[in-house]
Amino acid sequence: MIKPTSQAQLEAAIGLALRRHDEYQSLRQEAADLRQALADRKMIERAKGLLMKHLSVDEPEAFRRLQKFASNKNKKLVEIAETIVMASEALDGKTPFSR
């Protein structure tokens, strides 16, 4: 960093540092939000696949059923998807609770 030679330069440097910090924090939050959205999407895809397999329906129908169930239960789509995946794992014996 270049040493400021006046109070005005110091204030400008501090202002720039604060703006850069805010930008960095914003980018970190955006990255975290995107990671969560991707994880949610993966969970929904897994649940759709399970519904397609067990109910012998196509992808649009599986998604429609997920949406309808989430709406009826007033839950987020990803919450319903997580429940379906966990139930499937429990029934298939893929959980720590299985013997």
Image (spheres, grey):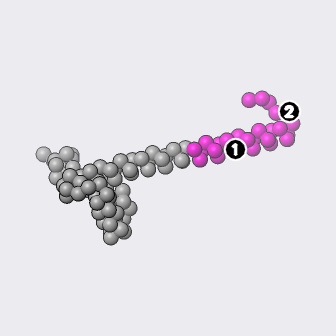
Sequence-first tag of 1 and 2: 2
At 80% across and 42% down in the image, what residue appears? 11
**Circle 1 is placed at which residue position?**
18
Q: Where is residue 35, by image quadrant? A: top left
* Disc 2 secondary structure class: loop
Which residue in the rendered view is the most extreme toward the right? 6
Residue at x 54% of width, y 47% of height:
29
Against 66, is 94 above or below?
above
> What residue is shown at x 16% (from left), y 47% (from top)?
93
Q: Is label 1 in a helix, a strand or a loop?
A: helix
Residue interval drawn in magenta: 1-27
**Could you tell me the amino acid type at mark 2?**
Thr
For this view, does 27 lie left or right of residue 92?
A: right
Q: Which residue is mark 2?
A: 5
Q: Position of residue 95 (x, y in %)?
A: 21, 47
On the rendered structure, is 80 left or right of 29? left
